[in-house]
Image (cartoon, rainbow, N blue to C red):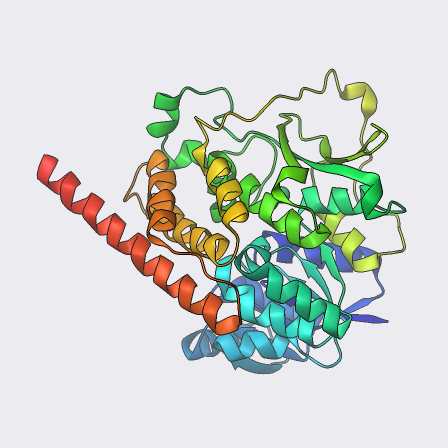
Amino acid sequence: MKAISILGSTGSIGCNTLKVVEHLGDIRVVAMAAGRNMAVFAEQIAAFKPELVSCGDDGCAEELTRELHRLNADVPRIVTGDAGLVAVATNEQAETVVSATVGAVGFVPTLRAIEAGKRVALANKETLVMAGELMTAAAAKSGAELLPVDSEHNAIHQCLRGETKREVKRLILTASGGPFRTKSKAEIENATREEALNHPNWKMGDKITIDSATLMNKGLEVIEAKWLFGFDADEISVVVHPQSVVHSMVELVDGSIIAQMGVTDMKHAIQYALTYPERRENCLPGLDLSQLSRLDFEEPDLERFPCLALAYDALRQGGTMPAALNAANETSVQAFLDGRIKLSEIAQINAGVMQAHTSEPVADLETVLRVDAWARNAADQLLAVKATSAAISN
Ligand code: MG
């Protein structure tokens, strides 16, 4: 029986991973980590009986113990915080680690799992954006496999089966365009939290849903694609495809374009990453081609969606610039979710932080963490300036 551990089990990818595990029937979950949602975590622990679990802090651990007692479930070994995440990520029994925490918190544990030579089913794109150099170098050293769970990269991974790198002309990432694809610049600027969280095709966590509305998600995915597949910015294109049926494509040197199509459900990509190279039946309905009236493809509009341009810029500058952009974006998205800034100000804050940052080589983990902390602080300062000027004009 295969053994896995899950980082971020109560999130959208984590919950779907458990559904896939249930469906496959021959995978054991040996370790799990979740942040704060202890009621759901306790139910997951009661159902899947991992030996090791990790949660946010001691307060969470107490709450989790109470919840487990309430469910009459066995209490496994509980660890907490950053060290707890690393313990789950490097659990000896787990051959595969599903890395599905949101944002930078998953960075160190994912790196440790790669260093330990585990297969990493990677749903946390921030990890590769922050330090693709370190992740890929560690994987090359330990022999760890990186299997993308992000639907676009999972699609490209499928399209590249059997192709060599020199046969590939470019990668084509599809973007749904999000809820504001057809909206004007002014409508996007004044969009509410609810409008921005209303993604047309995918049901996901809040942070990634906002990133999808600004197309920052696609920008982060361009950077992610570079590290997963080894192509440069000029060899990675983005095309808006509102139906989200084609999950991404690869153009080969002879002009052929290979596309991967399927239903929009993350369980497909998760199962692929867990069972690769084997393909198995999954629990999803097939794609009904007769129900597709049309497939549209259009160029992304970088003027209405400047975050995508920022990501290309960060990738071209290289070094620590993508890490700075990622940290700025996490901060500005949270500020938008908290109702502190407008949607269009996310790009302004991100651009401001990039401008203030001088990129340096990604020498080691410490460099990345230092830049990450610096960029969050820089974004906070720009947010404070905005708040002050807004108060004055009111
Ligand atoms: Mg994606």
**In the image: residue 73, left or right of residue 369:** right
Image quadrant where residue 287 sits? top right
* Ligand number 1: quarter of image: top right
**In the image: residue 243, left or right of residue 346:** right
Of 48 and 254, nearer the camera is: 254
| Quadrant containing the N terminus in the rendered view | bottom right
Of 320 and 305, nearer the camera is: 320
At horizontal 44% and vertical 76% (from top left) the residue drawn is 57
| Vertical arrangement, residue 373 with respect to residue 61, above or below | above
At horizontal 73% and vertical 53% (from top left) the residue drawn is 270
At horizontal 31% and vertical 36% (from top left) the residue drawn is 342
Looking at this view, name the residue that lies furthest to the bottom.
77
| Vertical arrangement, residue 181 with respect to residue 230, above or below | above
| Quadrant containing the C terminus in the rendered view | top left
At horizontal 45% and vertical 20% (from top left) the residue drawn is 183
| Residue 216, image x, y percentages | 49, 41
**In the image: residue 187, left or right of residue 181:** left
Determine if residue 5 is in view.
Answer: no
Looking at this view, name the residue that lies furthest to the top.
293
Image quadrant where residue 276 sits? bottom right
Of 39 and 336, nearer the camera is: 336
| Residue 330, image x, y percentages | 42, 52
| Vertical arrangement, residue 352 with respect to residue 128, above or below | above
